[in-house]
Image (cartoon, rainbow, N blue to C red):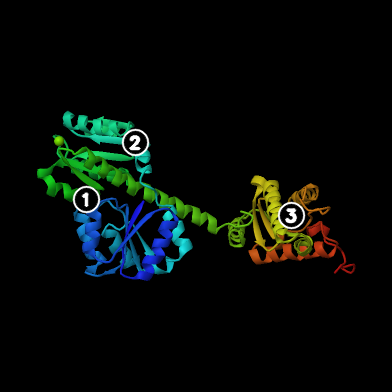
Amino acid sequence: MDILHVEMSQFFSRVIENAARSEGYGYANVTSIAQAMAALDAGGVDLIITARILEDGNSETMLTSLMQGPHRNVPIIVVTSDDSLENRERFFSLGVMDYLLKSDLVPGKLTQYFSLIGRGGELLDALRNMRVAVLDDSSMSLRVVRSIFHSHGVKQCQYFQESEEMFKAGDFDLYIIDLVMPKRSGEEVLLQVRTMNPRSGIIMVSASSNRVSLAHTLVLGADDYVSKPFDAQDFITRVKGVVRQMVLLQKIEEKGRQMEEMAKRDSLTGLWNHGSIHEYLHGCLEGDEQVAVLLFDLDDFKSINDTFGHQSGDSVLMMTGKSLRDGIGPAGEVGRYGGEEFMAVLPGMDGEGAAEIAEALLEHLRQMPSGLKERQITCSCGVADVRDGRVAPEIVEQADARLYMAKSAGKDQVVDRNHEPSSLASEEG
Ligand SMILES: [Mg+2]
């Protein structure tokens, strides 16, 4: 992928160039709208990144003229320091794919961003995997489109001369729609497709004499238009342009979902983190049902770290987390509560049932090969349920108090309400 960066600051230019090149992308820097247009006309630009203020105007001027010209399908990213809603809406109304905040311009973030933006070759592959509908009352036009698609290996296409047949055939990923048809106008069909299937790609086609009406379809929700008669190269380029937008959007959404999921997880063990397991507990406590909370703490973890090193300590944490997660199964959720402490929340379970499960989990840990020389992994556990409190702080405090009792009474054991040591007089250090 080749990036055209329209930017006057040498500093930002270097930052983006480094990130782009580290991903194997091509990079060119220009400082003015005029130079940017010339570079686009020369071809080969897959992505534009632009600053707000340029040598001969601002990015809005450039975006407006880009959208009216032949390069309107090249995705554009604006770099700005202003994260306001107003700004966001304006950029998106100007056809900007995304924007980067100046604070995002750090190598790690940029590299990650670039790595999710696809390379040109995959566009045809993506298109080949899409369901495509072509609607045109002229059988000649259909034949032309069919031959263009066919020569590019795009075979999952259906061709329709009437819109009703097309709607009956179900949903498609990409629609090529003729603007002028005898029964219903292409505009009507476009609106219906856009309403039914907001995520589909739509390309309108018509004679070049209908250019004004064609351009108007962009306002109605079309992603692009092509004039007849088709130039095969131009046609497939436009189609790829729309596919590129769709693919990028999917990737950005997927990345967003991944990041959301990652934010909920502890990076070492992959378990839920403190915040997520707490949120889950809160949710469970909202009902009237039983809920049990189990707090686990690895015994003598500090000495494992000191004796075997932190990498071994980390692997013990991972093994323990996995063992607890697997042991609890669908009965509830497990999170890394902090340090060497884990919390399990078992909805619908009372303390007695939970204590039995905890005993089994501790036994499993004892049997588990630890990977450490002559050293087994053991855990202490405190169990509480809603009889100890119907709000999170109370129930967690009680589980924590019992965990402390388990430690004091010699570790590697479960303490619940029925097995609290009668006296802590024999407390060990
Ligand atoms: Mg027609």
Left or right: 302 as drawn, with respect to 182:
right
State the mark number for residue 65: none
The x, y position of residue 283, in whole percent, is: 58, 57
At mark 2, the secondary structure is: loop
Secondary-structure class at tag 1: helix
* Left or right: 310 as drawn, with respect to 418: left
In the depicted view, which residue is nearer to us: 115 or 294? 115
The quadrant where ligand 1 appears is top left
Residue at (18% x, 28% y) in the render = 139
Q: Between disc 1 and disc 2, whose residue precedes?
A: 2
Question: Nearest the camera: 316 or 323?
Answer: 316
Which amino acid, mark 3?
Gly
Checking the image for residue 218, the label placed there is 1
Image coordinates for residue 104, horizontal then vertical, percent: 43, 65
- Measure the C-alpha gap from mark 1 to mark 3: 62 Å
Q: Which corner quadrant of the image does residue 17 belong to?
A: bottom left
Q: Amino acid at mark 2?
A: Arg
Give the labeled residue for mark 2.
131
Mark 1 in CB contact with mark 3 (< 8 angstroms): no
Q: Nearer the viewer, residue 139 or 393?
A: 139
- Residue 225 shown left or right of residue 305 in the figure: left
Residue at the spot 35% in from the left edge and 65% down from the top edge: 79
- Judged left or right of residue 137, residue 279 is right
Where is residue 135 shown, x and y percent of the image? 23, 35
Q: Which residue is mark 3?
A: 351
For the residues marked 1 and 2, what is the alpha-carbon distance in whole angstroms?
22 Å
- Specify the quadrant of the image occupied by residue 284: bottom right
